[in-house]
Amino acid sequence: MKRIFIIIAVAATMLAGCEKKESTASFIVRGADLGWLSEMERDSMTFLNEEGDAMDCIELFKATGMNAVRLRVWVNHKTGWSNLPDVLEMAKRVKAAELPLMIDFHYSDFFADPQRQDIPEAWQGMTPDELCKCVADHTTEVLTALKNNGIEPKWVQIGNETTYGMMWPDGKLDREQVNEDCQRPNGQISKEFRSDWAQYVQLSNAGYEAAKAVLPEVICIVHVDNAFIPRVNWYERFKAQGGKWDMIGLSHYPFTQDTLSWQEMNARCEQNVRDLYEVFGTPVMVVEIGSKTEELPEESAACLRDFNKRMEGMPGYEGVFYWEPEVYGYWRPAEYIPLGWNAYNMGCMTPDGHLSEAARILYEGLQ
């Protein structure tokens, strides 16, 4: 009986228009999000090869096996980092290195994640329709600027970790309801109309459609956090309201849960990727991963080796991007200082600026 239910559920999904797609990559992506690189270079941080010689960071990672770069873009951050001019200059370097590019739209002036999804200052006080136009215009502006410079991103993220929606309060999802859904068996959610989801989907689709208008072949990703938590029901709700995507994106930080080991976190991530591909038939990518390489070098290396072994070769799995692997030595962006924020502690370097064993495992695909 259970088998019949699963077959019916999958068939219904297919008939609803989510046709199963084959892999969109000719290789497993082993990428790096390098959004802080230009600021780190301004601060004279150096990146060393095995001989101890300084190298361009992109070329250093590429030589190790990195084969794609991800860059975030903010609307108008006060420091200028990750705004369009900075992203354009970084994208030119990625193109010169002959690497495919992912653009991660935050639709905010600062980091957007499950704890904050702030409307850009210039967009505040607008109607829902006006906000959708802002999303579309911003998407168009960034992608057109890249295209005019001969740069065509392979992937575009429509929002960053939008587990609870985007551009709050207008596109905010009910956090309690989202959390309840993830505890239910896959597919066992009501399909009733929800105004919060409708508002979020409207904003997300505005970005999707604008991206496709500039780059018809670009792969649009809708991205949520915590790959260890089941996410089928989240995408079921998104799809039920008309949400559009070409690829599912997940964040995976195996050392962030006190109650779960990194082995358990990897195992849950593996199962969730399998479930998402089985139900929706669209490729899945871990667009962010991070481990405590400087603090726990041996465990981090073992964790990423286990991750590679579990994930590579799995149907529907397209690859992974390490989030800010170039960070080391307690470096932090200048804006963190007045905020009282600590340095990011999940880069993938040694304390003196060499590539770590974990980085080599991830980028060389070692199992």
Image: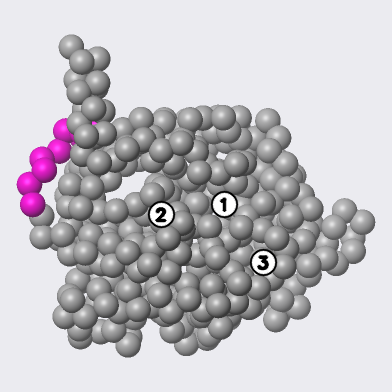
Residue furthest to the top in view is 1
| Secondary structure type for disc 3 | helix
How far separated are the C-alphas under marks 1 and 2?
Answer: 13 Å
Is disc 1 surrounded by few (<14), some (14 to 19) or many (20+) residues within 10 Å?
A: many
- Decide if residue 269 is in sight here: no
Identify the residue at image location x=67%, y=66%: 95
Question: Is residue 204 covered in magenta?
Answer: no
Which residue is disc 3 drawn over? Answer: 95
Residue type, label 2 = Ile
Residue type, label 3 = Lys
Which residue is disc 2 drawn over? Answer: 221
- Decide if residue 6 is in sight here: yes
The image shows a total of numbered marks equal to: 3
- Where 366 falls versus 332 (above or below)? above
Image location (x, y in percent) of residue 305: 65, 35
How far separated are the C-alphas under marks 2 and 3?
Answer: 21 Å
- Where 190 falls versus 166 (above or below)? above
Instruction: Judge left or right: residue 342 versus residue 174.
Output: right
Q: Nearer the viewer, mark 1 or mark 2?
A: 2
Which segment is the magenta one? 184-193
Residue 90: mark = none
